[in-house]
């Protein structure tokens, strides 16, 4: 593990190799060649064990978690699975694990997985040129380089298209999202390198994959995922944002519960097999976590997965990680707002005491850990209101037309029916969406993330959107007008009621 110093890791791994024999050794060294048989599948739920049963020290884990809390490390959850057992499931206020978390760019590993499933079904070909999947589009800058770019090269981050790459990926995304048609904007970019030659982390390229998947399967990526990946794995609680044309965000914004995100790691540990069914082709599972291109960084890249010397992993901004350690048969999942995975280094190094056999039971340590886990989710919270202000009754059901603005929002309507939930109806880029809003201090899942709200005063309604960090929206009602503040973008929408 990068989370455990290399000298200790390789000592432990070598010991494990000697204990389990040559066959398992080959599995550890060559992902995809051989995989351990599963005693069970966590389709309905993960089986659990004490940390000691999996070689971890409960007290050391508790100390590490408390340190993260005291340092306000920006972590929302930490989940550790070893040998198929969930030994730690920690959540940090304000995230309590009851609703799906945005996985940010860890989503890319799901997109490439779905592309591989579609290829196995014959819906697309990995080595066919990208442009062939868009016969009805007029693509700008269509030179010989772009004509040669394949689906596989998009999945491997070697597409050669104009991009800010890793350090400038957010600005590249912003440029795409500033256009009316995001897929078209991604396709129209100039070529700067021959495809396949140079690594360049490029989120718009992943969005092109989403469009290819939808256009070839007739299903949006989320719909396709539910049928061919999520349902087989028992993932029921998922949401995934879409662009103005209805294409699922191929690069990010998949929301899953941490325990469901871990199932992708478990699927990979077992060669793409789940309950006797080959969900993902075994050759893709192996190739996706082999180094396909050098990144010039400490970690290289496969197909949607980062690859290091001791692990392979999905990674997203803010601290979203699904890390798989084949030699230790372990999976670590983190979510966060500004969390750096390296902060786990000393914690896991101290707590992972015995990789080859269980530790003696420690009832005192288990009790201390459980008490700490219960306290991590506690915070000031929001107290449900005893009543709605008169303004809520006046504005409820009114439609407000918004002036032209960069967000693409053209109309808003709020409905306040009771003290538990409200709804916001938003028309954006010509599409209507409904946002459930928790008024009882509990988040409700909305199109852009879990959302709750409260009345700050008789005229001001506050929306809190749990994303990578909490986003705040202030809605000010004044007579027949509404103002919606979006502070992170420096935008205030001016809207006026229709037919007052």
Image (cartoon, helix red, strand yellow):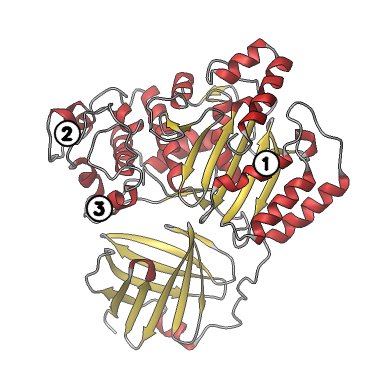
Which numbered disc, 1 or 3, marks the residue that appears first in the sequence? 3
Q: Residues within 10 Å of mark 2 (few under 14, many from 20)?
A: few
Mark 3–mark 2 Cα distance, whole angstroms, equals 24 Å
Please state which of the two labelled residues, at mark 3 or mark 2, is closer to the viewer: 3
Which numbered disc, 1 or 2, marks the residue that appears first in the sequence? 2
Q: Does 1 sit above or below residue 90?
A: above
Residues tagged 3 and 2 counted as in contact (Cβ below 8 A): no
Q: Which mark is residue 135?
A: 2
Percent across and percent down for residue 383 are 62, 76
Percent across and percent down for residue 64 are 70, 50
In the rendered image, the quadrant that contains the N terminus is top right
Percent across and percent down for residue 426 are 35, 66
382 horizontally vs 216: left or right: right
Residue 329 seen from this side: no
Q: Which secondary structure lies at badge 3?
A: helix
Residue, disc 1 = 348
Q: Which mark is residue 175?
A: 3
The residue sitting at 42% across, 28% down in the picture is: 302
């Amino acid at each position: 593990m990068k989370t455990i110093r290399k000298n200790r890791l390789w000592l432990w791994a070598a010991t494990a190799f000697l204990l389990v024999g040559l066959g398992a050794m080959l599995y550890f060294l060559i992902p995809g060649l051989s995989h351990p048989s599963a005693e069970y599948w966590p389709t309905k739920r993960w089986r659990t064990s004490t940390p000691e049963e999996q070689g971890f020290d409960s007290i050391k884990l508790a100390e590490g978690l408390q340190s993260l809390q005291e340092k306000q490390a920006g972590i929302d959850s930490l989940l550790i699975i070893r040998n198929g057992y969930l030994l730690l499931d920690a959540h940090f206020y304000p995230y309590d694990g009851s609703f799906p978390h945005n996985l940010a760019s860890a989503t890319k590993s799901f997109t490439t997985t779905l592309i591989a499933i579609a290829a196995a079904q014959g819906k697309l070909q990995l080595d066919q040129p990208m442009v062939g999947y868009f016969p009805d589009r007029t693509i700008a800058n269509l030179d010989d380089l772009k004509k040669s770019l394949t689906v596989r090269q998009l999945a491997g981050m070697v597409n050669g298209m104009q991009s800010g790459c890793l350090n400038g990926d957010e600005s590249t995304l912003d440029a795409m999202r500033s256009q009316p048609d995001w897929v078209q904007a991604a396709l129209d970019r100039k070529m700067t390198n021959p495809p396949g030659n140079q690594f360049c982390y490029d989120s718009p390229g992943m969005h092109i994959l989403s469009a290819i998947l939808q256009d070839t399967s007739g299903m949006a990526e989320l719909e396709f995922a539910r049928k061919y990946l999520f349902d087989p794995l028992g993932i029921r609680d998922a949401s995934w944002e879409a662009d103005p044309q209805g294409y699922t965000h191929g690069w990010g914004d998949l929301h899953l519960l941490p325990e469901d995100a871990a199932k992708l790691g478990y699927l990979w540990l077992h060669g793409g097999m789940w309950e006797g069914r080959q969900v993902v082709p075994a050759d893709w599972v192996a190739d996706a976590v082999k180094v396909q291109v050098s990144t010039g960084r400490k970690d290289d890249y496969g197909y949607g997965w980062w690859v290091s010397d001791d692990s392979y992993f999905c990674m997203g901004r803010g601290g979203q990680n699904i890390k798989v350690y084949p030699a230790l048969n372990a999976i670590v999942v983190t979510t966060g707002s500004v969390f750096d995975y390296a902060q786990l280094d000393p914690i896991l190094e101290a707590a992972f005491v015995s990789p080859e056999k269980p530790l003696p039971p420690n009832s005192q340590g288990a009790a201390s850990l459980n008490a700490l886990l219960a306290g991590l989710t506690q915070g000031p919270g929001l107290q449900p209101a005893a009543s709605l202000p008169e303004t809520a009754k006046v504005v409820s059901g009114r439609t407000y037309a918004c002036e032209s603005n960069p967000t693409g929002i053209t109309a808003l309507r709020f409905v306040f029916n009771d003290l538990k939930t409200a709804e916001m109806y938003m028309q954006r880029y010509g599409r209507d969406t409904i946002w459930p809003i928790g008024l009882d201090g509990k988040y409700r899942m909305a199109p852009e993330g879990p959302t709750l709200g409260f009345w700050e005063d008789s005229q001001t309604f506050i929306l809190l959107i749990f994303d990578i960090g909490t986003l705040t929206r202030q809605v000010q009602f004044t007579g027949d007008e509404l103002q919606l503040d979006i502070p992170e973008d420096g935008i205030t929408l001016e809207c006026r009621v229709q037919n007052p």
